[in-house]
Image (cartoon, grey):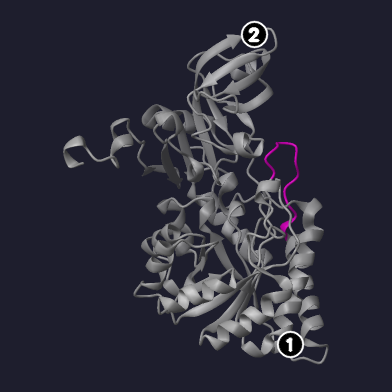
Amino acid sequence: MTDGEGWPTSTDNPPVRRLSDWPAEPLRDLADEYGTPLYVQDLGRVKANASRLREAFPGADLSYAVKANATRAVLETLADRGVGAECAAAGEVKRALAAGFPARRVRYTAVNPPARDLDYVCGLEAADELVLTVGAADTLDRVAERGFDGRLCVRVNPGVGAGHHAKVSTGAEPKFGVPYDRAADVVDRAIDHGFEVVGLHAHAGSGISGDELSAHRELVRRMGTLAGEVRDVGLTFVAVGGGFGVPYRGDEPPLDLDAVATATREAYAAGWREGAGETADESDRAQLAIEPGRYFVADAGVLLTTVNTVKPTPDTTVVGVDAGMTTLLRPAMYEAYHELRSLEPGAPRRGRVTCDVSGPICETADVLARGRSLPDPGRGDLLAVGNAGAYGYEMAGNYNSRPRPAVVAVEHGEARLAARRETLAGLTRLEPKAEDS
């Protein structure tokens, strides 16, 4: 079902939205009105994904990993749905609170936090309401020095990692969390510092697919075992991260979320019984918590880009577009695949051409796609890049002094500007003028 503008309605909630499901004419209208490159985020789809996660994980504490997409429109949408905010930096904490997340639903999961980040978080008026996560024993001292007396969580490195790329597999990377065999000692040390330890946290990685479910299950089991061993502390939650994958290729099946949820619950319960003992009271088991990011927002966003140049070469046709690695970094950084689609009305009637779609950045890596079959492209054509709602705008930058793109949020067929397009003049706004030096 669609509304009058062609946008899918809230009752249309398939496991994944494909690029072909996006209505072409409204996207063309948005490109005409706001220009390109342009990110479009469908807030109705964000809500639908939140509903699916709640249905799959009844009884679990559900939070959103803010780093996936921190635009205010997305954050306000999820805050209104009662979802918590998992924040990896002080700036994300500030954004979450400003967007309406209650402090008690905010978790600051820092990785090697800079001093100014700790100064900000520990100095908040509501610091005693949020949860601060530490991933190293010496962070306890740093937090104590700042007078923090709120709720504390210990991040654990379970020695199990998974994910779509080595750069996002965190579960076994030494950078992340306290080594598993030392975690109980760090919990004891935190209590000795006078902290209220309310949770344990671990995360396997990002973009976990069905093939990697065994690694996720083992991480959850180990965290359940640890929680059972330290149950006398009075933990209220055990967070096992998110990282639930979405299909970036059009022929990939959607993640079986119900199977993931069942495996997660079973692994957690089995691990807890192993750590606490078979005779332990099940009512003492801390609440399972999950913290997806990508799953909420990836298929709720597309990137629109305009063809500037078409250059036939002996090996391929190079299609130059106005979006590049400063707009969407994932292909250059992770060799990530994003589906492409021509939004031109007559595209289906054109012959198809094998193309490399390249951006305007002076780097060989600035290629959004290689060897793709597209309707014979022409200058001025509008292309859509699929699954751009997660780690798209969030990772945009100013390399080559290129302004960042605009973002439009759509809900019930109505569009509003969620982030203005950066201007050339705005690129130097942080630089002091000569007379100020």
Q: Is residue 252 magenta?
A: yes
- Tell me where residue 176 appears, x and y as whole percent: 63, 62
Q: Main secondary structure of the magenta part?
A: loop
- Tell me where residue 420 appears, x and y as whole percent: 35, 40
Classify 348 as above or below 329: above
Q: Which residue is mark 1?
A: 282
- Tell me where residue 426 appears, x and y as whole percent: 30, 36
As rendered, which of 138 and 47 lies closer to the eye? 138
Mark 1 or mark 2, earlier in chain:
1
Write the residue at 48% across / 42% down.
Answer: 393
Q: Which residue is mark 2?
A: 313
Q: Measure how far apart labels 1 and 2 are at the Cα level.
A: 67 Å
Write the residue at 78% across / 71% down.
Answer: 267
Look at the image and tell me in which quarter the N terminus lies.
top right
Q: Amino acid at mark 1?
A: Glu
Question: For the magenta stretch, what is the residue range?
Answer: 247-257
As rendered, which of 189 and 7 lies closer to the eye? 189
Figure quadrant of residue 225: bottom right
Classify 7 as above or below 307: below
Is residue 36 in view from this perspective? no
Q: Looking at the image, which residue sits at the far left?
A: 435
Q: Is residue 111 magenta?
A: no
